[in-house]
Amino acid sequence: MTERNNLIRALLIFALFITLEIVSIVLIKKNSIIQRYQISLFTHNIKSFFWEKNENIIQFFKLKKINEELADDNARLYRLIDEYQNILVRQKEDQLNLSNTYVTDSLFISGEGGSFDFIPVTIIKNSSNKQHNYLTINKGRKDGIEENLGVISDRGVIGITHAVGENYSLILSFLNPDQNISASIKSSNTFGPLSWSGLSVNRAELREIPLHTRFEVGDTIVTSGLSAMYPSNIPIGTIESSKVSDGVFNQMSIILFEDYRSVTNVYVVKHKDKKMMDALEGASLK
Amino acid sequence: MRLKEPLSNNFLIRFINRMQNRKLFIVAVTLIVQLLLNDFLSFSLYFVPALFLIIPITLNFDTKPWNVLLITFLSALLFDILSDGVLGLYAAAATFAAAVRILILPLFISNEMWGKINYPAPQSIGPYRFILFSILMFSAFMVVYIFFDGFGIVSSSLIIIRFLLSVGINSAAVFLILYFFEKKR
């Protein structure tokens, strides 16, 4: 009788263990950030409030450095504008027939007449030390943020908006090994999927680059602009090394420009025709 | 003439000795440290801080197995929510570690150790046994954690380094915490 009771007890404990594991695995599998956000919405809002206050204090002491960075950014933007103006002038002079796409894509940075809107936001919580990293920004739905928008800085791709609250949003960081973005080698325009290597905060891997593509170590990698999520030509990093993968492709190690541990000021980018493109994609999937 | 103990040491030991529930204090401090590690320190990707596993490790010898599973699952789930990780990841790994605890704990206890400390600690089951016990607990935790976190995505060399460093550092940390706090009992 006692043995039977022990057996039943052991089976019950085992059943409880299996149940708890299944619950955990379901949570992991369904780990849509939205679900997570719903669970912890209340605590997250309170925490976000304090993170913002904390960030304000830190920002105050960082003002000098931020000013210097802004000055650098301004200088770089001036150079870019100059570069684009030169391109336009040269092309006018050559009387080339410019396609609308090229003009709008190239001038995205002006914010007028381009394909993208830029919403400046501040990161108030950042993780970069895990295999799956997330960020929290200080703007939400009431500022025009929506789910699945790209987030960039002037030094690279930061991630994608996943859960949007009224005042704060959660970003799925680029520092997730299973997140791919389309990137290209600036010198040759050859593109391939770029993803975080998972080994170091400042390294990523560019894959599926055909063997015949010419490139050199140190070449710049930029966003390809082949998705509606990120504008084209945003600098991401430089080629550190390459190796042949599967016998037909080059796989490159990329040193990222962005320091994900200290990034604070970023932009949420919103394609002006996103709704139309989503509708089209939805229709084609049906 | 009697030499005075250093003030800070003296104060800390008296404070800990006066605590009604010393274990509660140890666990609380460790959990705060774990949260700080998760939120504010930039660790390399080679190490997973899992000090919160001190909760199932230090549950009393006579805690019922289903209570071990439930307490561990709920505390890990709380950490999942508080830390910005994948929801359910800590919970799955810690629950497995709790199941391993239920299976292996009888191997580490004997009649003569039932004294003041009624949970696994270096002073109750012996330092070497405790180190082995915590290594097994953290190994069980890390196997499941790594499986769900990055298996198939990250390289095998990273997985091995991550496993060894995490088990080693966490086991050493839990050993030192318990050894220090239970030393003057």
Image (cartoon, coloured by chain):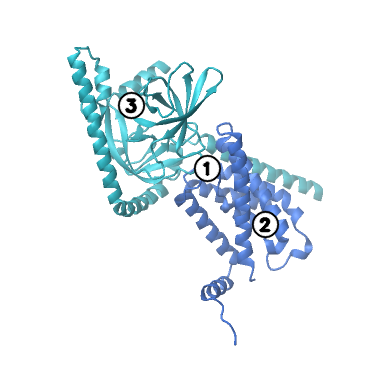
Chain colours: A cyan, B blue
Give the label, 2 or 1, closer to the camera.
Answer: 1
- Residue named by callout 2: B63
Chain that bears disc 3? A
Type of amino acid under label 1: Leu
Q: Is A105 on the left-hand or right-hand side of A41?
A: left
Q: Nearer the viewer, residue B181 or A248?
A: A248
Number of callouts: 3
Number of residues whose C-alpha sits closer than 10 Å to that of mark 3, classed few (under 14), some (14–19) or many (20 or more): many
Number of residues whose C-alpha sits closer than 10 Å to that of mark 1, classed few (under 14), some (14–19) or many (20 or more): some
Is the residue under label 1 in contact with that under label 2 (CB below 8 Å)? no
Q: Position of residue B132 (x, y in %)?
A: 70, 53
Q: Residue at x 24, y 20 (%)?
A: A103
- Residue named by callout 3: A233
Q: Is A150 on the left-hand or right-hand side of B41?
A: left
- Residue named by callout 1: B45
Q: CA distance from mark 1 to mark 3?
A: 30 Å
* Residue A148 visible in the shown view: no
Chain that bears disc 2? B
* Residue A163 visible in the shown view: yes
Helix, strand or loop at disc 1?
loop
